[in-house]
Image: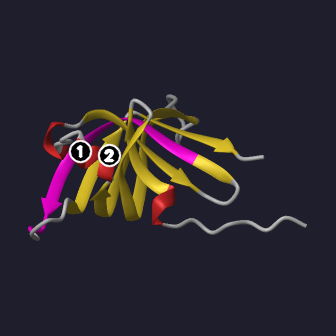
Amino acid sequence: MTVSQFPTSADIYLELNGKKLAVVQSYTAQTVRSSTTVEAFGESEPVATIPGQRRHTVILSRLYATDEAVKDGVNFHDLEDFNLVICKPDRRVIYSGCQWKDLEETGRLGEMVLEKVTIVAARRVETTLK
């Protein structure tokens, strides 16, 4: 019998070029796909639907910059083409090609924390852990 570990905030993080930039306390993900219906002359209902492109939007809450990112002088406002990694007990979800859409921060002396970040991802991939 194997025991699964439950994800912690360290299991949700932003990375760039293999380096962990920030850990995330929580997230909300939404994927929207545009679809087109195919209509046929004389039919009262569509005869098919064609799936369209997907758009992934993820809202992240409470991002804490890692010590390494702080030492490297990371600036979240300049961040582009990064990954969001979400480790779950049985799989890993990676949103890649990410760009931030909205950044919301609360100023506290000595803290490198973003309260809320909305990102848009180009791709979403799930891999099963063995």
Q: Report the side of 5 relative to 54 (left or right).
A: right
When the figure is inspected, residue 1 is found, relative to residue 84, above or below; the finding is below
What x and y, as percent, mark residue 10?
47, 60
Give the quarter of the figure containing the N terminus.
Answer: bottom right
Q: Is residue 101 left or right of residue 6?
A: left
| In the foreground, 130 or 49 | 130
Q: Residue 89 versus residue 109: which sits nearer the camera? A: 109
Q: Amino acid at mark 2?
A: Glu
Residue at label 1?
71
Q: Which residues are magenta?
A: 93-107
Q: Is residue 91 above or below residue 51?
A: below
Along the viewing direction, whichever of 79 and 127 lies nearer the viewer: 79
The residue labelled by disc 2 is 68
Q: Quadrant of residue 65?
A: bottom left
Name the amino acid, label 1. Lys
Expressed as whole percent of the image width and height from the top left, the position of residue 38 reads: 50, 31
Tell me residue 18's x, y (percent). 44, 33
Residue 101 falls left or right of residue 26: left
Residues packed near mark 2 inside 10 Å, few (<14), some (14 to 19) or many (20 plus):
few
Residues 57 and 111: in front is 111
Relative image position of residue 49 (x, y in whole percent) = 54, 36
